[in-house]
């Protein structure tokens, strides 16, 4: 009992801005137990429980967000306008919702409102760990070693759906969309 108590005391981190204690063993558990296999297709990304289908020939980006997040709600109209402008320019994009919602019904409602395919809760947890993007409310599950909170976009490449660009909308807001580029694919969208 004494050794366990000592491990907990030594593992405790400082209190964060929301007043939570974090334990290192919780962070290690969440990062070790998730299998982060490579995604080779859109079927791997959406999985058997995913909602919606991906359309071929589109650049794919993961949208990490939540309906309860004020910054996400402010960012989403610009993101939807950007998606529509890309479609009109003949450079369509597919945004996939990776939810940080409290429950599956809220996640489905948000995905429907945004007009995006939805990944399953299990796949969302894998993607959050893989790309190190999650909300502050989820720090108890994923730890504090994240590169961004929500909202954020991760643009995926055509080969093996690997990350080619990270757009931290939490830090930069809608102006981060002007940074979207992958070389020769959408230079005209970024210049307007």
Image (cartoon, grey):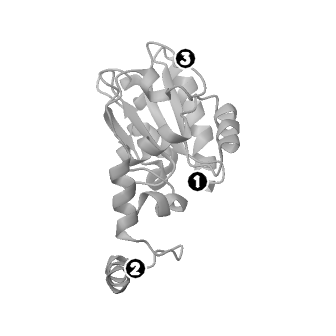
Determine the CA span between mark 1 and mark 3. 26 Å
- Who is closer to the viewer here, 31 or 160? 31
What is the x, y in percent for residue 123?
A: 48, 37
Q: Which mark is residue 14?
A: 2
For the point 33% across and 26% down, which residue is it? 157
Q: Evaluate if marks 1 and 2 touch, with contact meaning CB atoms under 8 Å apart.
A: no
Closer to the eye: label 3 or 2:
2
**Taking the image as drawn, is residue 2 in sight?**
yes
Residue carrying label 1: 71
Q: Please state if 70 lies on the left or on the right of 27 as rendered.
A: right
Q: Please state if 93 lies on the left or on the right of 101 as rendered.
A: left
Determine the CA span between mark 1 and mark 2. 26 Å
What is the x, y in percent for residue 98?
A: 52, 40
Q: Is residue 8 above or below residue 116?
A: below
Q: Which mark is residue 88?
A: 3
Q: Is residue 83 above or below residue 178?
A: above
Determine the CA span between mark 3 and mark 2. 49 Å
């Amino acid at each position: 009992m004494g050794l366990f108590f000592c491990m907990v005391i030594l593992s405790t981190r400082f209190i964060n801005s929301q007043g939570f204690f974090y334990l290192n063993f919780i962070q290690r558990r969440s990062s070790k137990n998730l299998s982060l296999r490579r995604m080779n297709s859109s079927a791997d990304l959406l999985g058997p429980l995913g909602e919606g289908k991906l359309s071929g020939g589109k650049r794919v980006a993961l949208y990490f967000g939540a309906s309860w997040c004020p910054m996400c709600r402010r960012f989403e109209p610009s993101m939807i306008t950007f998606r529509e402008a890309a479609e009109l320019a003949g450079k369509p994009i597919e945004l996939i919702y990776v939810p940080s919602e409290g429950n599956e019904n809220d996640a489905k409602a948000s995905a429907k409102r945004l007009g995006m395919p939805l990944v399953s809760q299990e796949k969302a947890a894998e993607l959050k760990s893989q790309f190190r993007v999650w909300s502050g409310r989820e720090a108890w599950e994923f730890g504090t070693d994240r590169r961004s909170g929500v909202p954020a976009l991760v643009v995926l490449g055509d080969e093996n759906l690997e990350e080619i660009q990270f757009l931290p909308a939490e830090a930069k807001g809608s102006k981060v969309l002007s940074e979207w580029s992958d070389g020769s694919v959408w230079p005209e969208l970024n210049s307007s």
